[in-house]
Image (cartoon, rainbow, N blue to C red):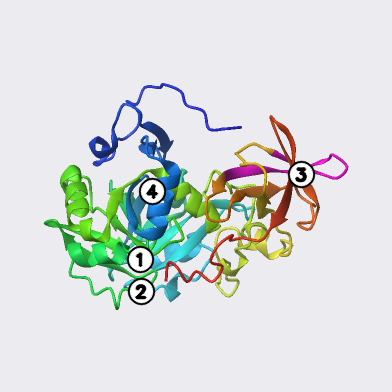
Amino acid sequence: MAISHLPVSDHRFKRSPFFACNDRPDTRYGIYNERLYPLSSGYDEAEHYRHLRTYCCLYDVPETPLRITGNDQNALLEKLFTRKIQNIKIGRAGYAFACNHNGGLLMDGVLMRPNAEEFIYVQGNGDFLNWAHAHSQEFNASVEDFDSWVIQIQGPTSLQVLEAISDIDVSKFSYYSVTEAQINGDSYYVSRTGWTGERGFEIYSKGSDFDGPGLWSHLLERGAEAHLIASDISSMHIRRLEAGILDYGTDMDQDLNPFEIGFGHFVDFEKPDFVGRTALESTPRTTRRVMGLRSQSVKPVRGDTLIDSSGALVGRVSAGAWSPDLQCGIALIRLNLGVDPSTAIHLVNADGKHNAEICALPFIDPEKRLPR
């Protein structure tokens, strides 16, 4: 099933402060956390992919940062997340899962600790805020959506842009570092993270009261020497698939647990308690249900099905693309329960049956040398 587009009213969805910077007659928008974001803006996908891999690109992204404060902030976060929060030091960030009581993946995101007073959780798509509120009653802690907005600058020359717009010493600003910085006259959170598998950083506003178009123009102007250009999700999408980066609600959800997606190392049973612990303790930890797929003959798309040699349905494509660097179709797939990842398969779409093979993730840079 290819991505479809429908004309809908936008009055219930938030427009980012950078909306005018991307709005063109041919721009198509998606909805994520009740926020509009530009899926495509008429750019040449292959050309922007190559630019991302060679220089750097600027993206308006719909992630939603939440602020956690209060004397019991650490205790609340230890309750909500499967990893040990006390290991995230000031000035650092970490990838963090929250699970439901059955051990299913409720939310994923980056948990940042910019200072001693607060944590910032940059959540994926879904209603994590009310879940956090429901579990915060016994704690002296607050979780709030502070109307923060996010942009990413990604690509090999991205840190040149960071040097040009801030006083951050990039030689000491390592992968998954986080800090606060003055940019174009306002204070922002900045982290060495991203959604492309390339070197890059993200900028998070401290509310919605700032000049979005002014910041956008400032970044492009100061980033000109690093060949920074504005792009859209289409080029980012290819790179996140190559890097094996999963999207909550697309590639994973509450029907999967961390072990089934290959992220069991983010579950710390040395913690005294966290939501979902009891269920996860009794969960088989060897079954992999989210894997990669390669096809030399076709570009996979979401909804394509996978069959084995007998014709039985064994899984589906959750996201796919044609990789210009690998010169083949690639996809993230979800296997049905009980399916061995070594199973020989075919991909089935509207044009028929195609040769394909299940493979490990990521497709490119398994040691994550590029973002580091």
Residue at image position (55%, 72%) is: 271
What separation in Å lies between label 4 and label 1 (alpha carbons)?
15 Å
When the figure is inspected, residue 20 is found, relative to residue 209, above or below; the finding is above
Residue 325 appears in the picture as rendered: yes
Q: Is residue 126 left or right of residue 60?
A: right
Which span of residues is magenta-colored? 305-320
Disc with the residue nearer the chain's start (3 vs 1): 1
Mark number displayed over residue 346? 3
Residue 130 appears in the picture as rendered: no
Q: Are marks 3 and 1 in contact (CB under 8 Å)?
A: no
- The residue that label 1 is drawn on is 192
- The residue that label 2 is drawn on is 174
Q: State the quadrant of the N terminus.
A: top right
What separation in Å lies between label 2 and label 3 (alpha carbons)?
42 Å
SS at badge 2: loop
Q: Is residue 105 left or right of residue 34?
A: right
Disc with the residue nearer the chain's start (4 vs 1): 4
What separation in Å lies between label 3 and label 1 (alpha carbons)?
39 Å
Residue at image position (28%, 46%) is: 147
When the figure is inspected, residue 287 is found, relative to residue 9, above or below; the finding is below
For mark 4, does the 10 Å Cα neighbourhood hold few (<14), some (14 to 19), or many (20 or more) residues? many
For mark 3, does the 10 Å Cα neighbourhood hold few (<14), some (14 to 19), or many (20 or more) residues? many
For mark 1, does the 10 Å Cα neighbourhood hold few (<14), some (14 to 19), or many (20 or more) residues? many
Residue 119: give x, y in percent of width and height: 34, 63
Q: Amino acid at mark 4?
A: Glu
Q: Nearer the viewer, residue 295 or 247?
A: 295
Q: Amino acid at mark 1?
A: Arg
Per the image, is 316 magenta?
Answer: yes
- The residue that label 4 is drawn on is 63
What separation in Å lies between label 2 and label 1 (alpha carbons)?
7 Å
- Type of secondary structure dominating the magenta stretch: strand
The quarter of the displayed image where residue 130 is located: top left
